[in-house]
Image (cartoon, grey):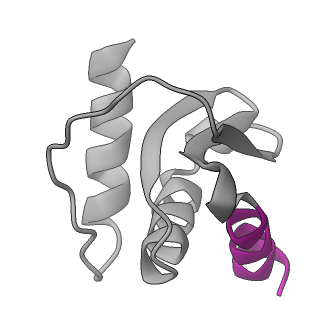
């Protein structure tokens, strides 16, 4: 639910010393968007994974248009032209 996700995001941000620039934005629905996902067992129970992913994407100037979480995955909607960089960034963040 929405409240649970917001609580998870807040917990993730509180557990990390770095700040993430969160701003309101107006979003257009359209083509040229790609969903990039991280899949891991029980990832929802580890808010530091979400925080690390968002920080890495932000540090590489990749705009996350929307995000979703499930028990075993985190998904990020990004512009199509940023898709390869998003995959590379997340891979580097979690696999070195």
- List the single residue furthest toward the front: 31
- Judge left or right: residue 7 versus residue 59: left
Could you say where residue 89 lies in the image, as x and y percent from the top left?
Answer: 69, 75
| 91 is within the stretch colored magenta | yes
| Picture quarter with the N terminus | top left
| 14 is within the stretch colored magenta | no
- List the single residue furthest toward the left: 24
Q: Nearer the viewer, residue 2 or 65?
A: 65
Rendering quarter of residue 63:
bottom left
Could you say where residue 43 lies in the image, as x and y percent from the top left?
Answer: 68, 43
| Picture quarter with the C terminus | bottom right
Position of residue 59 relative to residue 74, above or below, is below
Could you say where residue 57 lies in the image, as x and y percent from the top left?
Answer: 53, 69
- Judge left or right: residue 10 versus residue 95: left
- List the single residue furthest toward the bottom: 96
Q: Residue placed at 27% from the left, 20% from the top?
A: 3
Q: Residue placed at 30% from the left, 33% from the top?
A: 27
Could you say where residue 48 lies in the image, as x and y percent from the top left?
Answer: 51, 61
Q: Nearer the viewer, residue 55 or 27?
A: 27
What stretch of residues is rendered in magenta? 84-96
Q: Main secondary structure of the magenta part?
A: helix
- List the single residue furthest toward the top: 1
Q: Residue placed at 85% from the left, 78% from the top?
A: 95
């Amino acid at each position: 639910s929405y409240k649970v996700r917001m609580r998870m995001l807040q917990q993730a941000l509180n557990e990390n010393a770095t700040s993430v620039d969160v701003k309101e934005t107006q979003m257009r629905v359209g083509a040229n968007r790609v969903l990039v996902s991280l899949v891991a067992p029980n990832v929802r129970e580890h808010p530091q994974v979400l925080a690390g992913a968002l920080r890495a994407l932000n540090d590489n100037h990749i705009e996350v248009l929307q995000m979703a979480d499930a028990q075993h995955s985190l998904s990020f909607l990004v512009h199509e032209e940023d898709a390869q960089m998003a995959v590379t960034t997340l891979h580097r963040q979690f696999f070195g």
